[in-house]
Amino acid sequence: MTAADLAPQELRTLVAVAREGGFSAAAGTLGTTQSAVSHAVRGIERKVGVVLFERGRYGARPTPAGERAVVHARRVLRMLETLTAEARGAGAGPDGGDTVAGPLRVASFRSAALHLLPPALERLAARHPGIEATVRVVREVGPGTAGEVAEGRADLGIATLGTSAPVPPELVGDVLLEEPYALVHPAGHPRPRSLPLVDWTENCSSYTRAWWAAQDWIPCATVRAEDDGAVLSMVSSGLGMAIMPELSLASAPLSVEITDLGPDRPTRSVGYVTTPELAGTVAVRALIRELRALHPRRV
């Protein structure tokens, strides 16, 4: 037997053990026994020809090979779900087109989840009522939303895309919009550029750093917040100024003022990423279509 003989239930076992951190906990979610899970993992390892989990007194942790195997297991299981859903929906639309029912997992950073996704998901639900979209907010730090897609935990990610690597190499995607940065400060302040800088970890990524470094009026951040909503609250309370992208300012309170940074202002690219195998599926294509309809690219 080879790895090609792995059955879907074996893939589910791999994912469950990795997710739960041990054989006993995985057995509980799978509705089986600890010994059955242990036996199944040993059989999988024989087929694959490599150890996938480190066993210890505190549970089971994937080895580097196991981490890759679990990623592929998640993606294969998702495609099996998609196979069934799309086969059932082929030609089932009112005009003879395709329809689909089932989950659509979206990962998004906070401001996009608040202001970019909701109208697109509303239109998606009207056109495809069988799609059950869920959104998980992920910080754009480290792997970010693209990492959720690459790891098989999301079907589509709304991501900030750097200019040097628009899409991670194992994914596909494109830019939806370019959002400009602006200066935000307490309303009516006579000298807003003299205020301390309020910032947060996700801000000022690689696509703004060159501009940022060239501005001698911007001090080092003396106040740091957890997210852009907290930054706005601090600025609103008079604690400082901030330089923020447009989506983060969509619900700015009246107590703050937004000032344009001029023609050389920095921008950040916001787009979508997905896997090559999911890019052609009905649900992912439908959501991308709605996002493009509502948010044509602009600068």
Image: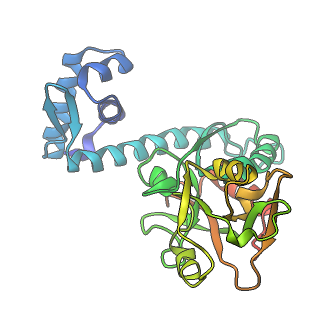
Q: As displayed, is residue 171 above or below residue 125?
A: below
Image side of residue 33 versus residue 168, left or right: left
Residue 222 in picture, x, y percent from top left: 54, 60
The image quadrant of residue 10 is: top left
Q: As displayed, is residue 71 above or below residue 257?
A: above
Which color mode does the image show?
Answer: rainbow
Q: Is residue 241 visible?
A: yes
Q: Nearer the viewer, residue 89 or 108?
A: 108
Task: Name the residue at 57% across, 54% down.
Answer: 157
Task: Name the residue at 36% across, 20% down.
Answer: 30
Quadrant of the frame with the N terminus: top left
Task: Name the residue at 74% across, 45% down.
Answer: 121
Q: Is residue 180 visible?
A: no
Residue 49 in picture, x, y percent from top left: 13, 46
Residue 63 in picture, x, y percent from top left: 19, 45
Q: Nearer the viewer, residue 202 or 92?
A: 202
Q: Nearer the viewer, residue 214 or 66?
A: 214
Image side of residue 240 versus residue 1, left or right: right
The image quadrant of residue 128 is: top right
Task: Count the labels in the image.
Answer: 0
The image quadrant of residue 170 is: bottom left
Q: As displayed, is residue 8 above or below residue 216?
A: above
Quadrant of the frame with the C terminus: bottom right
